[in-house]
Amino acid sequence: MSATIDFYFDFSSSYSYLALPGIAKLADDLDATFNWKPIVLGAIFQSMGHAPPDPDTAKGRYVWHDVERTADLAGLPYRWPKPFPFNGITASRIFWYLADSDLDRAAEWARAVFHASFGEGRDCSNPAVLGEVAAAMGQNADTLLAAAADGAVKAKLKDVTSEAMRRGVFGAPTFFVGDEMFWGGDRLGQLEQFVRGE
Amino acid sequence: MSATIDFYFDFSSSYSYLALPGIAKLADDLDATFNWKPIVLGAIFQSMGHAPPDPDTAKGRYVWHDVERTADLAGLPYRWPKPFPFNGITASRIFWYLADSDLDRAAEWARAVFHASFGEGRDCSNPAVLGEVAAAMGQNADTLLAAAADGAVKAKLKDVTSEAMRRGVFGAPTFFVGDEMFWGGDRLGQLEQFVRGE
């Protein structure tokens, strides 16, 4: 049993962070390879006329609580980053720079940024914070931050965001097994059933 | 271990139908009592400016597929009622008429309407179809359909819909354990954890 799963996410997506333990478990259980694919979800929302839930509505209040409760019941540390939502574009560009030479290193970067953002509540829109995350990984902070300004890296992030939109992505996290799409960490159980052919 | 769980739903809600096996299992596993509460979700959507997902959008297409896949993976019969969405107000009023004297009979009615709608694809906005569902339950169809026009029964459905909105309901199915709210059948696992105090 092995599978390749595309995993589209935005660094500012709480539910993407909350899906990480399920992803790690599934990678083991299915001997699956996850292709981590950060995108700019805000650009997709904008083109679709969507918006993140407004915290002053019934749905917004519920979603905020649901995020905290989901973390709590899973025993996962959770702190709202300030500001929230935040701009994850620099973190995403650095991911794609790293991915060009080392996919595992890029995934390690993604996990580290998620942990700093939602595990520790740090502001990962701030280059200084990203520099510290890079340094803690043993990476050269200046090199990574400079790479985020590179034209090819910027283009890659735009391309993957366009690719996601073409495939029907409208939220995060979103997973694909071939053309079969699953939206939300709470569909990982169905994804597993699907892969196992049950 | 026992618990009382309020269960708000709309007869036209696919995800409410899909939650029924999970509800039955939880009722057994937790020795829980579910208070079935049909509401007019359309009235809540209207007051909030929400709309059901448009099938011509990326999200709408995904949701349609997700409903079918969820039924398929659960081994649950599923047919889209025609029309869909449909007006569940008469079915809901009959529920509340039955609930006034016999809660179990009312829940049996709800399961029968859901099965006719989504298991068989029948049009449960049609009084003739509801009459057949009533007769198959051994109920007098004329009595039930006449009751749906009763002022007190109509008022009850409005009251419960208002109650749901006051408690923060914005979609269906929605569950409450005391004041703790859970939206969606895919949160029944968390609801169980919550009740067990895990």
Image: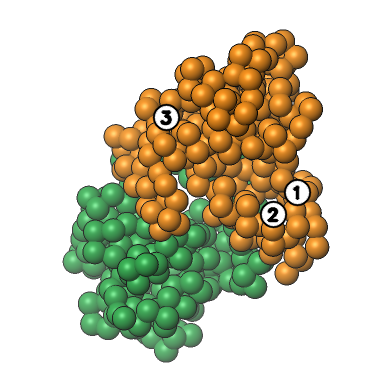
Chain colours: A orange, B green
**Residue A7, image x, y percentages:** 67, 42
Disc 1/disc 3 C-alpha distance (Å): 29 Å
**Residue B25, image x, y percentages:** 47, 78
Residue marked by disc 1: A33
For this rendering, which residue is in front, B34 or A63? A63
**Residue A87, image x, y percentages:** 50, 22
Asked whether the residues under marks 2 and 3 belong to the same chain, the reply is yes
* Neighbourhood count class around disc 3 (C-alpha, 10 Å): few under 14, some 14–19, many 20 upward: many
**Above or below, comparing residue B31 to residue A22 in the picture:** below
Residue A3 picture quarter: bottom right
Type of the residue with mark 3: Arg
Is disc 3 placed on a helix, strand or loop? loop
**Marks 1 and 3: which is nearer the front?**
3
**Above or below, comparing residue A137 to residue A127 in the picture:** below
Residue marked by disc 3: A122
**Above or below, comparing residue A32 to residue B91 in the picture:** above
The numbered mark, 2 or 1, whose residue comes first in the sequence reads 2
